């Protein structure tokens, strides 16, 4: 069951859900608005001819720190990673689901390709997988509303929260955008 605004506030007070910083002004009826951070990762297309998911590619992506006034232009067909500003977390009995904002979807900006799930036990700055599927470039700005997080309650507390030793969680507690760690699955 998706949590309402009232329940989200209660769960934050209880410590079951973390949103830092939190402001009621960004609380929606059944979600919380998240804002774009200034750290992006872009592909080094000039140096990398292909991605091999079995190999650790040292220079696959490079960091770009975006000026809040100039913004960042995502060109048609381009894919970049970025963070949200807020740290979000859930205990072992809750999950979070990252969703796009309707106004951005209507201009062709996709905010997550697949990784919109905040696992039980994780607390981090969510990574955005930004893709421009419009025919025109889109300029976005750090600090703007970029996504929303909805929360759900599990039927029972999970036995192995994200970050548990046996899970070998690759992105536990990340506070800065990080590229793919898929290669670790082949060790």
Image (spheres, rainbow, N blue to C red):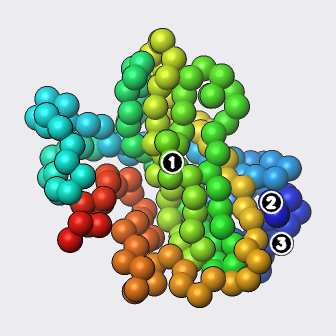
Along the polypeptide, which appears first: circle 1 or circle 2?
Answer: 2
C-alpha separation, residue under disc 1 versus residue under disc 2: 19 Å
Q: Which residue is mark 1?
A: 114
Q: Position of residue 108 (x, y in %)?
A: 56, 23
Mark 3 or 2: in front is 2
Mark 1 or 3: in front is 1
* Local secondary structure at mark 2: loop
C-alpha separation, residue under disc 3 versus residue under disc 2: 14 Å
Along the polypeptide, which appears first: circle 1 or circle 3?
Answer: 3
Q: Residues within 10 Å of mark 1 (few under 14, many from 20)?
A: few
Q: Residues within 10 Å of mark 2 (few under 14, many from 20)?
A: some
Q: Which residue is mark 3?
A: 10
> Is the residue under label 2 in contact with that under label 3 (CB below 8 Å)?
no
C-alpha separation, residue under disc 1 versus residue under disc 3: 29 Å
Left or right of 50, for residue 36: right
Q: Position of residue 103 (x, y in %)?
A: 68, 27
Q: Which mark is residue 2?
A: 2
What residue is drawn where x is 50% and y is 65%? 124
- The residue most toward the left is 47
């Amino acid at each position: 069951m998706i949590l309402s605004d009232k329940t989200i506030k209660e769960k934050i007070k209880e410590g079951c859900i973390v949103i830092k910083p939190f402001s009621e002004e960004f609380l929606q009826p059944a979600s919380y608005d998240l804002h774009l951070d200034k750290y992006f990762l872009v592909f080094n297309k000039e140096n990398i001819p292909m991605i091999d998911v079995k190999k650790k590619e040292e220079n696959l992506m490079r960091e770009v720190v975006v000026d809040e006034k100039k913004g960042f232009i995502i060109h048609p067909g381009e894919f970049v990673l970025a963070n949200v500003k807020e740290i979000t977390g859930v205990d072992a009995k809750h999950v979070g689901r990252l969703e796009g904002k309707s106004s951005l979807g209507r201009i062709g900006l996709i905010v997550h390709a697949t990784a919109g799930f905040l696992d039980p036990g994780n607390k981090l700055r969510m990574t955005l997988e930004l893709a421009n599927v419009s025919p025109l470039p889109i300029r976005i700005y750090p600090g703007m509303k970029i996504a929303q997080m909805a929360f759900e309650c599990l039927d029972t507390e999970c036995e192995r929260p994200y970050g548990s030793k046996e899970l070998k969680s690759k992105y536990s507690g990340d506070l800065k955008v990080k590229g793919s760690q898929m290669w670790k699955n082949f060790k």
